[in-house]
Image (cartoon, grey):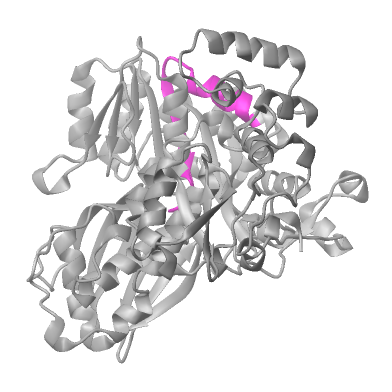
Amino acid sequence: MSEEDKSISNLKNVTPGQRPFRDLQKKPLGEVLIKTGTITQDQLDDALQAQKTSYGKRLGDILVEKEYVTEDEMLKSLAIQLDLPYYDRLPVAEIDPELVENIPIQFCRDHLILPIARDSFNITVAVADPLNIFPMDDLRLILSANINMVVSTPNVINNTINRVYERAQDASQKAIDALNVSDIDSSEDLEEAKDLLEASNDDKPIIRLVNSLLARAVKERVSDVHIEPFETEVIVRFRIDGTLHEAMQVPKRHVGAVVSRIKIIGKLNIAEKRIPQDGRISIKVAGKDIDVRLSILPTSHGERVVMRLLDKSAGVRRLEEMGMDDWTYRAWTALVQQKHGIVLVTGPTGSGKSSLLYASVLHINEPDINIMTVEDPVEYTLAGLGQIDVKSKIGLTFSAALRSILRQDPDVIMIGEIRDNETAKIAVESSLTGHLVFSTLHTNDAASTITRLDDLDIEPFQIASALLGVMATRLIRRLCEQCKEEHTPTEEEMKLMEITPKDIKGKKIYKVGSGCEHCFQSGYSGRTPIHELLVLDDPLRELLMTTQDSSAIRKLALKNGMKTLRISAVRKVLEGITSIEEAISTTQTEDLEM
């Protein structure tokens, strides 16, 4: 077993004096850092000098601030100095949830401290700051036991706290088993917990079930939760990294109460079951602010619920973090810095269009630029932007908002989506009158966007004059770093990817592994964007005046050097990010067009 994968059995009996660098125990921290080769003497002297004018600040904090050491390196050295074990990872699955049942989750979060093991006499506690002894005294009183410490990073401890407290709650299936018709009052509007992990066990079973369902969805990085009623059962499915998985089943007799509970927290009409309803829910799970878009649709077997989860605490990624190759990044940044014209992002639902738009707007956001947005809904609130939330029920549509925005003297306009002819016309006309317009369309590739604009009755000369470029984007699953396996591509795979043995020489290609706890046994963990950028040059503009056929446009763009989604996906394979199967599957529409 590796050093990183220490188990609870090794944690139960922690005895000092059995670890490396015993000769450095109780030595000054600076000496420990130098002896372990972490810093130089000059760096130590500089930090000590700074400490003289920083009253009360620890040497370690100063070294981290000056970027002489990382937080991990500092904690490792501190563990050596104090003769404590250091853990890069904590074995979450082996931690007994009963250890935390009498400890408030906020106490653990505030002090970054968590009990992780016990034996007959001692309880082992993971800490991020072993010099802070006051919470240790509190724990001794709460647990009535002797405390042994191990050291880990704040991030590892915080993630472990969330996962252990999730397990300490009643699990989803326990909540279902506890359901009793006499317990259910679906019309009762109970107060929401500030954090679903802090919800009381005294809450009614339906409330616990819905809370547990949402908490589990956030934990497993779910983008969409589907509650689907059928004739004899109700199936809950999670969409993880773009793929739907069955998560659990709810007894059919309780689906009405579950849907009513969701309507209550979404502030919808629980009595209305004949027409579709849409709403939003703001919740907090494990310290994360989650925005939930709620859609309820009547079906022949009951109301179908889909909840789309957005982790607002994750923030907006920067443009340089979007995974573009150098050429695409340079070309796209040049487009989004133009003074006027229209720039479009295209792709199916859930392909990363909004993320790219936000990153692009953030890239050009400066005090001397007036940026206005029209969105349905506003997903992220950005400083310095005027953001309008579309409300179709009261007549505030995309087109109505755009007409008003033009009187607000904008330099840049971001439209969440072009859905109709009127919005398209206003967007194009705005781009022709001195505004830079960003928006999205639903098409399969960049070239098809021209055909779609033609379908929306935009004149060819307007498209040629206004359109600067189109970025098609998709999200492709990343291989789990913990369990991915090396792979030698076959001749057929190289043919599909249009690469040669020379292209893969010196590179490591990976395939899906057997799965592990980090990827929930799927072999994939997270997603990354791939891109196809069509930049309108003079030859393309001339072609647009004679035809809007996407095949002809695509052929000319490829001749002029456009890099396709398949090429972008293959680059991710050669970088060891994704598998050959995933790259081919995600871009299979290109095979149909050939």
Furthest residue toward bottom: 232
Residue 427 seen anywhere in this rendered image of the structure: yes
Whether the magenta-drawn stretch holds residue 348 is answered as yes
Task: Give the residue drawn at x 13%, y 73%.
Answer: 273
In the picture provided, is 277 more to the left or to the right than 463? left
Observer-nearest of 391 and 194: 194
Residue 342: name its quadrant: top left
Q: Position of residue 317 (x, y in %)?
A: 49, 35
Task: Name the quarter where the N terminus is drawn.
Answer: bottom right
Task: Name the quarter where the C terminus is drawn.
Answer: bottom right
Start-end of magenta stretch: 328-352
Residue 71: name its quadrant: top right
In the picture provided, is 484 more to the left or to the right than 60? right
Residue 21 seen anywhere in this rendered image of the structure: no
Task: Give the residue drawn at x 41%, y 70%.
Answer: 98
Q: Position of residue 66 (x, y in %)?
A: 60, 18
Q: Where 460 sits versus 128, above or below?
A: above
Q: Position of residue 376 (x, y in %)?
A: 27, 44
Residue 305: name its quadrant: bottom left
Q: Where is residue 493 in the image (x, y as percent from the top left)?
A: 81, 61
